[in-house]
Amino acid sequence: MTDTHRTPAAATGEKQPFDLGTGPGRVLVWFYGVFTVAAASRSIVQMILDFGRAPLAYVLSAVAALVYGFITYSLVRGGEKARRTALVCCAAELLGVLVVGTWTMAEPSAFADATVWSDFGMGYLFIPVILPITGMMWLRRARTA
């Protein structure tokens, strides 16, 4: 049977996997990709040049880069399992931003240098706190599509 003779999945009652990287998801993929590179680059340079100055801050930036990278991968991969995994990672990311943001506001001397999530991402125009919320909204919508 050739591709031109196949019946669309909707006509056969099969459920098509939702492509997470389409529409608004494409913008999320772009932002998460940029933040993966930004956070990874920042943390690698800081760890190489001056790790002893602020190890906790630099490790937290590296963790943020890993979370961003995994969410980017999940959005590009698509499918229900990737959607659920990305949703959990977005929730963990939001929790991290809120904890680190609150910590840095309540005790500014706790970190010798800023992280990606310091002050709720103020150094990154608050995108680190907006991105997981937007991501969770998109991923929840994608479940119903």
Image (tube, rainbow, N blue to C red):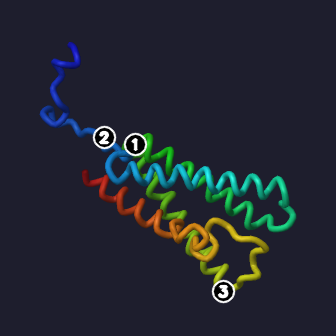
* Disc 1, SS: loop
Which mark sits nearer the N-terminus, 2 or 3?
2
Task: Please state which amino acid type lies under the numbered disc 2.
Answer: Pro
Q: Quadrant of residue 138?
A: bottom left
Check disc 1 and report the residue beneath it.
78
Q: Which mark is residue 106?
A: 3
Counting the numbered discs, the total is 3
Residue 125 in percent (x, y) is at: 54, 70
Residue 136 in percent (x, y) is at: 40, 61
Q: CA distance from mark 1 to mark 2?
A: 8 Å
Task: From the viewer's perspective, tell me whether residue 22 is left or right of residue 130.
Answer: left
Task: Please state which amino acid type lies under the numbered disc 3.
Answer: Ala
Q: Which mark is residue 125?
A: none
Callout 3 touching callout 1 (CB < 8 Å): no
Query: In the displayed image of the protein, which residue is found farthest to the left?
Result: 11
Callout 2 touching callout 3 (CB < 8 Å): no
Task: From the viewer's perspective, tell me whether residue 15 is left or right of residue 106.
Answer: left
At 72% from the left and 57% from the top, the residue drawn is 43
Callout 1 touching callout 2 (CB < 8 Å): yes
Check disc 2 and report the residue beneath it.
17
Q: Around disc 3, counting alpha carbons within 10 Å, would you say few (fewer than 14), some (14 to 19), or many (20 or more)?
A: few
At 66% from the left and 52% from the top, the residue drawn is 40
At 38% from the left and 45% from the top, the residue drawn is 21
Task: From the viewer's perspective, tell me whether residue 97 is left or right of residue 143.
Answer: right
Q: CA distance from mark 3 to mark 1?
A: 39 Å
Position of 73 relative to 101 (above/below): above
* Disc 2, SS: loop
Residue 60 in percent (x, y) is at: 69, 63
Q: Quadrant of the N terminus?
A: top left
